[in-house]
Image (spheres, helix red, strand yellow):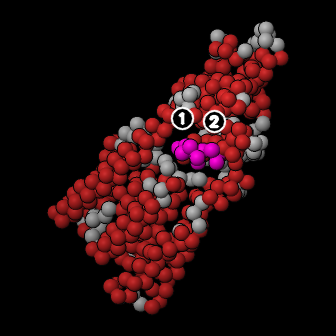
């Protein structure tokens, strides 16, 4: 993702392609509407209580609306959720129903909002999920008048559940995060029940077991759907676009052979370096192939690259990488973008020196040192999550690839 230092020209371009703003407004204000319909009739709220709750929900709903708009502009969506926002809307509406049932039932341990929080996260992104979950929780609080401690506990287990699923790898092994999330929910809810009654009753244990079982089924369904319908599909896309004979690369070769071979060599280093430091190998390799693909259609690399990415159905992470790499005067954030940057610079330097003198004897360790010095002094990596140890590993790899550089003649 790009560094949040205001909206760049590229982000403005993305905003033009985003959903119309009014798409999100009814979603964000729906909890306030539900509160109006149910508060006075079913919960006997006074006019003052109704007005106070309505103002709070409407205000938070508008803040949430603003967050969703920014997420559209910044491209802050996991997986391919930016192209399938109905997933988030469906989960949010389901969460609204569950939150309303919770307010009616008023059973402290009968709580399924952690699965909702995790599903919101997986079907959107971090900011959208936190905002949506807190809005639903606030509606339940206004209806059921939870204590501050109970509200804080429910907020904690929802956000903790999201955190447990933040670092799923490309194999999408979700068994351990799922187990930890549900056990955390059960323990916290039993703790709330014990604090309220001074003991654990059979009813408390029964509803905790029901919440655990239903939560397991809901999350397993959601995770299986994402695994089979999204992640495996993206893996197939990477296999296709990372083939040197992919249509787009063939077109690049026919249009500009030098740019094609530069992309091939950059992708080689990106793939190797990603494996060495534990970055996303498929994403880095694709970034190496396509980081300058936009120049096939003109000088504006970033705008044309995003158009090409949309035409060829590139995965969202790759489109974000192209956007991050191509943004002007914006520090890089991800390790993958740093790998593409350094690989591009190293390949460009070696190819340039060989073009000046094909028989030159180059000192690759010195070239790598110069490349790193230039990039570090440009401050483009100041905000990057890559570590100095990982940068050292990359530089040593560049210096040690002496035989491979023969292909760059």
Vertical position of residue 321 compared to residue 389: above or below: below
Residue at 59% in and 68% down = 21
For disc 2, the marked residue is: 290
Count of all numbered marks drawn on residues in the image: 2
Name the residue nearer the viewer: 41 or 30: 30
- Contact between marks 1 and 2 (CB within 8 A): the answer is yes
**x, y (%) of residue 387?**
61, 33
Element assignment for label 2:
helix
Q: Is residue 61 magenta?
A: no
Residue extending farthest to the bottom is: 47
**x, y (%) of residue 169?**
44, 38
Mark 1 crowd level (few <14, some 14–19, many ≥20, 10 Å Cα)? many
What segment carries the magenta color? Answer: 306-315
Q: Is residue 307 magenta?
A: yes
Q: Is residue 406 visible?
A: yes
Q: Main secondary structure of the magenta part?
A: helix
Name the residue nearer the viewer: 78 or 52: 78
Between the residue at mark 1 and the residue at mark 2, the CA separation in whole angstroms equals 9 Å
For disc 1, the marked residue is: 241
Is residue 103 left or right of 235 when viewed as pictured? Answer: left
Is residue 299 left or right of 241 when viewed as pictured? Answer: right
**Label 1 vs 2, first from the N-terminus:** 1
Name the residue nearer the viewer: 99 or 350: 350
Residue extending farthest to the right is: 356
């Amino acid at each position: 993702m790009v560094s949040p230092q205001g909206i760049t020209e590229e982000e403005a371009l993305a905003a033009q392609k985003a959903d119309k703003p009014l798409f999100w407004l009814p979603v964000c204000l729906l909890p306030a509407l539900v509160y109006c319909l149910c508060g006075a009739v079913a919960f006997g709220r006074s006019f003052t209580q109704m007005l106070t709750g309505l103002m709070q929900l409407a205000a938070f709903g508008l803040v949430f609306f603003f967050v969703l708009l920014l997420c559209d502009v910044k491209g802050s969506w996991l997986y391919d959720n930016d192209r399938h926002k109905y997933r988030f809307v469906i989960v949010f509406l389901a969460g609204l129903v569950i939150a309303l049932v919770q307010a009616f039932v008023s059973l402290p341990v009968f709580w399924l909002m952690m699965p909702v929080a995790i599903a919101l996260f997986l079907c959107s992104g971090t900011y959208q999920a936190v905002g949506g979950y807190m809005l639903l929780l606030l509606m339940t609080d206004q209806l059921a008048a939870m204590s501050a401690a109970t509200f804080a506990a429910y907020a904690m287990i929802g956000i903790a559940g999201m955190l447990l699923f933040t670092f799923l790898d490309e194999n999408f092994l979700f068994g351990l995060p799922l187990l930890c999330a549900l056990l955390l929910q059960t323990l916290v809810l039993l703790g709330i029940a014990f604090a309220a009654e001074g003991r654990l009753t059979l009813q408390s244990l029964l509803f905790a077991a029901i919440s655990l079982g239903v939560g397991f089924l809901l999350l397993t369904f959601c995770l299986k759907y994402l695994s089979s319908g999204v992640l495996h599909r993206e893996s197939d896309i990477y296999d296709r676009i990372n083939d040197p004979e992919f249509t787009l690369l063939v077109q690049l070769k026919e249009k500009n052979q030098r740019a094609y071979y530069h992309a091939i060599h950059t992708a080689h280093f990106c793939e190797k370096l990603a494996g060495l430091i534990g970055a996303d190998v498929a994403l880095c390799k694709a970034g190496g192939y396509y980081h300058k693909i936009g120049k096939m259609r003109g000088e504006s690399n970033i705008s044309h690259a995003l158009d090409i990415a949309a035409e060829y159905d590139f995965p969202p992470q790759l489109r974000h990488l192209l956007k991050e790499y191509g943004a002007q005067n914006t520090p890089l954030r991800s390790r993958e973008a740093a790998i593409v940057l350094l690989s591009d610079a190293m390949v460009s330097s070696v190819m340039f020196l060989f073009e000046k003198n094909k028989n030159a004897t180059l000192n690759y360790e010195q070239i790598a040192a110069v490349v790193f010095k230039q990039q570090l002094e440009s401050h483009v990596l100041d905000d990057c999550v890559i570590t100095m140890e990982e940068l050292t590993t990359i530089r040593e790899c560049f210096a040690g690839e002496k035989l491979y550089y023969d292909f760059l003649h």
